[in-house]
C-alpha cells in the first residue's frame, strides 16, 4: 500500500489543528475557559453600566472605555481562539518543517521535512480527527500533526479512513 500526503503547515492548517485539539483533548478546559470569559464579559458590561450615584446608566468615562476595550478583546479571543492558537503554534515551528511529506506503511508512517525524517507508530495516536480539509492525528494535549486532504495520493479518502481505523483501532472523530 502506497499512501502519501504532502502538507504545508500554514495558518489554515495550524488553525484546523488547534480546532481539533480544542474539540477533543482540550474540550473540558476549553469549555471552562469559555464560561469564565463569558462571566468576565458580563461583569465588565455590568460595571460599565453601573454608577454609584445614579444606578444603571451609561456615561462616557474612562472606566467605561477601559471596560469596552476589555470586552472587545475578550470577544475577539473567544471568537478567533483557534486562529490565535494556530498562529502561536506556527511561530514555534522549527525552520525547515513548514512542509512535510508523509508516507504511510502497514506498521508505521514516515514524515520527511527539509531538516530530517521521523518515524511514527500508529499505537501512539490518541485521537484521529477529521475536518473538511484536513486529517489531524492527536498524540497528546500539545502534540498533533495535520494532513491536507487535497494532497493525498495512492488511495481515496474513504480508503485512507478505513486504513487508519483498521491499523489504529480508533474511530475518526469529525470536528
Image (spheres, rainbow, N blue to C red):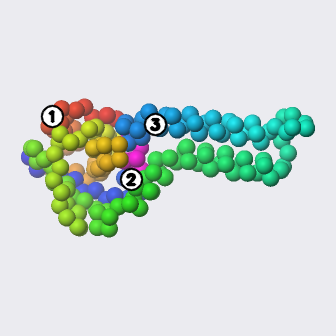
Give the side of residue 109 with respect to residue 52, left or right: left
Q: Which residues are magenta?
A: 14-20
Cα distance in 3D space between marks 3 and 2: 19 Å
Height in image: 141 above or below 171? below
Nearest-to-viewer mark from 3 and 2: 3
Quarter residue 118 falls in: bottom left
The answer to whether marks 1 and 3 mark residues whose Cβ atoms lie closer than 8 Å is no
Seen at 34% across and 58% down, the residue is 9
Seen at 87% across and 34% down, the residue is 55
Give the side of residue 156 with respect to residue 173, left or right: left
Residue 163 is one of the magenta-drawn residues: no
- The secondary element bearing badge 2 is classed as helix
Q: Main secondary structure of the magenta part?
A: helix
Nearest-to-viewer mark from 1 and 3: 3
Numbered circle sitting on residue 29: 3
- Which percent across, then down, holds residue 48? 77, 42
Q: Is residue 57 visible?
A: no
Query: Which residue lies under the disc numbered 2?
Result: 14
| Neighbourhood count class around disc 3 (C-alpha, 10 Å): few under 14, some 14–19, many 20 upward | few
Query: Which residue lies under the disc numbered 1?
Result: 166
- The secondary element bearing badge 1 is classed as helix
- The secondary element bearing badge 3 is classed as helix
Cα distance in 3D space between marks 2 and 1: 27 Å
Q: Is residue 43 visible?
A: yes
Amino acid at each position: 500500500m502506497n499512501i502519501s500526503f504532502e502538507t504545508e503547515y500554514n495558518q489554515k492548517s495550524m488553525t484546523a489543528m488547534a480546532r481539533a485539539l480544542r474539540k477533543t483533548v482540550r474540550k473540558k478546559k476549553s469549555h471552562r475557559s469559555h464560561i469564565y470569559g463569558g462571566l468576565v464579559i458580563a461583569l465588565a458590561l455590568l460595571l460599565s453600566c453601573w454608577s454609584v450615584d445614579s444606578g444603571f446608566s451609561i456615561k462616557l468615562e474612562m472606566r467605561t472605555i477601559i471596560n469596552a476595550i476589555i470586552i472587545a478583546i475578550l470577544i475577539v479571543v473567544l471568537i478567533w481562539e483557534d486562529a490565535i492558537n494556530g498562529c502561536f503554534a506556527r511561530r514555534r515551528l522549527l525552520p525547515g518543517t513548514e512542509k512535510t511529506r508523509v508516507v504511510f506503511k502497514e506498521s508505521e508512517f514516515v514524515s520527511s521535512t527539509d531538516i530530517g525524517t521521523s518515524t511514527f507508530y500508529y499505537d501512539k495516536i490518541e485521537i484521529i480527527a477529521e475536518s473538511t480539509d484536513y486529517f489531524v492525528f492527536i498524540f497528546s494535549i500539545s502534540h498533533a500533526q495535520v494532513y491536507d486532504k487535497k494532497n493525498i495520493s495512492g488511495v481515496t479518502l474513504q480508503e485512507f479512513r478505513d486504513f487508519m481505523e483498521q491499523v489504529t483501532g480508533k474511530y475518526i472523530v469529525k470536528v
